[in-house]
Image (tube, rainbow, N blue to C red):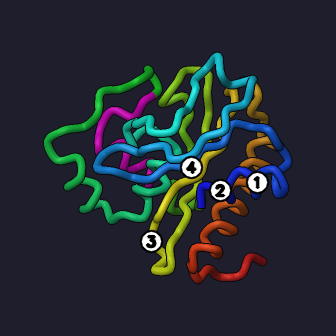
């Protein structure tokens, strides 16, 4: 999975060379198992293999959490919610559940400056043969570079990437129309 995600991104995206990440969920955190940082984004935030961030703030974490029931999310954060990283970070389980409702409806996740000010990440879950989240993929870019048309292209790119990897992992996904 880690060997393929970067090559797939470069061949199937409108933004080759962008910052992309692949992470897995561990407790309340995501752990980055692959990352390719763009030269443009290194001043905002540099992702590294093995780095941990609170799932509640990251695009990949929210992609994972969106596959959980509200009860499972509340149980995960019972008694402890991560301290905010930026003024934009979600502050409570209730606010996170509202975001997850939107993610479930839209089919992709977004970190709008919740990990680092000035950086937006768009993510999607990679599913296993049981159609459960195995990993999350995300693309990151400066918030000032995110026009509505670029956002639509990135959403299309990241969901296509996650579907492609999911298919290779044995997921049974409905055909795109």
Disc 3 packing (10 Å; few <14; some 14–19; many ≥20): some
**Above-or-below relation of 110 to 141:** below
Q: In the rendered structure, which segment of residues is drawn in magenta?
A: 89-100
> Residue farthest to the left?
79
Q: Residue at x 64, y 75 (%)?
A: 167
Q: Mark 2 to mark 3: distance in Å?
A: 21 Å
Is there a contact, CB below 8 Å, between mark 1 and mark 2? Answer: yes
Q: Residue at x 72, y 30 (%)?
A: 38
Chief secondary structure of the magenta portion = helix
Q: Secondary structure at mark 4?
A: strand
Q: Is residue 40 magenta?
A: no
**Residue pointed to by mark 2:** 3
Disc 4 packing (10 Å; few <14; some 14–19; many ≥20): many
| Image quarter of residue 126 | bottom right
Which callout, 2 or 4, points to the residue nearer the camera?
A: 2
**Residue pointed to by mark 3:** 132
Q: Mark 2 to mark 4: distance in Å?
A: 11 Å
Q: Nearer the viewer, residue 30 or 80?
A: 30
Q: Residue at x 61, y 27 (%)?
A: 119
Q: Earlier in the sequence, mark 4 or mark 1?
A: 1
**Residue pointed to by mark 1:** 7
**Residue pointed to by mark 4:** 22
Q: Say whether residue 126 is left or right of residue 27.
A: right
Q: Secondary structure at mark 2?
A: helix
Q: Mark 3 to mark 4: distance in Å?
A: 16 Å
| Image quarter of residue 46 | top right
């Amino acid at each position: 999975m880690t060997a393929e995600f970067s090559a797939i991104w470069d061949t199937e995206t409108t933004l080759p060379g962008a910052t992309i990440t692949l992470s897995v969920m561990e407790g309340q955190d995501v752990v980055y198992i692959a990352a390719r940082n763009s030269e443009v984004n290194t001043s905002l935030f540099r992702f590294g293999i093995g780095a941990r961030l609170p799932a509640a703030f990251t695009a990949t974490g929210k992609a994972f959490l969106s596959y959980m029931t509200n009860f499972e999310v509340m149980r995960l954060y019972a008694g402890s919610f991560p301290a905010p990283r930026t003024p934009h970070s979600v502050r409570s389980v209730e606010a996170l559940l509202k975001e997850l409702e939107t993610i479930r409806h839209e089919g992709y996740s977004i970190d709008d400056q919740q990990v680092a000010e000035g950086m937006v990440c768009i993510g999607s879950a990679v599913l296993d043969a049981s159609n459960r989240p195995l990993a999350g993929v995300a693309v990151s870019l400066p918030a000032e570079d995110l026009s509505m048309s670029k956002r639509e292209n990135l959403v299309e790119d990241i969901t296509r990437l996650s579907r492609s990897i999911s298919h290779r992992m044995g997921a049974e996904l409905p055909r795109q129309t």
